[in-house]
Image (cartoon, grey):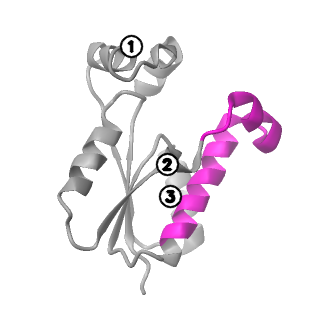
Amino acid sequence: MPAPAILVVTGASGAGKTAAVRALEARGLPGVRCYYFDAIGVPSIDDMHREFGSPERWQAVTTQQWVEYFAANPDAAELCVLDGQTRPTFVRRAAQCAGIRVARVVLLDCAPAARHARLTGPRDQPGLSNPQMDCWAA
């Protein structure tokens, strides 16, 4: 099976990544498979520092693992869509290393007030509604 194309949907916490990818997945499009970055588990910040040296390094390693999985293409996908808060540079580097020819990143964004409302309301993750996430979103 040839390597699929990859689309990574990224953005700040609360921007709507998961909702968008779930909506796409619900359409059941032939050849399109959706994946969720955090499905493999997210270690604590302390564990990220201890095991990887930093949260950014954990993100880079985990992005590489996902892309290698897609390159092996066990799900016979034509397009792998990944919902994940990761840097576009990590995606490009991982795709290049894995021999993926088509890899794109789309950034989802929304108004800060909407993001804060999602995080403090339905998501019940008020700790993610902070200046650092605002900076990431900007």
Nearer the camera: disc 1 or disc 3:
1
Does residue 46 appear in this view? yes
Q: Secondary structure at mark 2?
A: helix
Q: Find the distance from the CA under tag 1 to the CA under tag 3.
A: 33 Å
The picture places residue 23, in percent across and down from the top left corner, at 22, 48
Task: Give the quarter of the image for residue 7.
Answer: bottom left
Inspect the magenta stretch and tell me whether residue 51 lies in it: yes
Element at label 3: helix
- Name the kind of residue labelled 1 in the image: Thr
Image location (x, y in percent) of residue 94: 57, 61
Mark seen at residue 120 = 1
Question: Split into 4 quadrants, where in the image is the N terminus?
Answer: bottom left
Instruction: Please give the label number shown on residue 37.
Output: 2
Residue 60 position, x and y percent, is: 62, 49
Name the magenta segment's main secondary structure. Answer: helix
100 and 30: which one is in front? 30
Q: Are marks 3 and 2 in contact (CB under 8 Å)?
A: no
Above or below, 69 relative to 109: below
Q: Residue at x 61, y 44 (%)?
A: 59
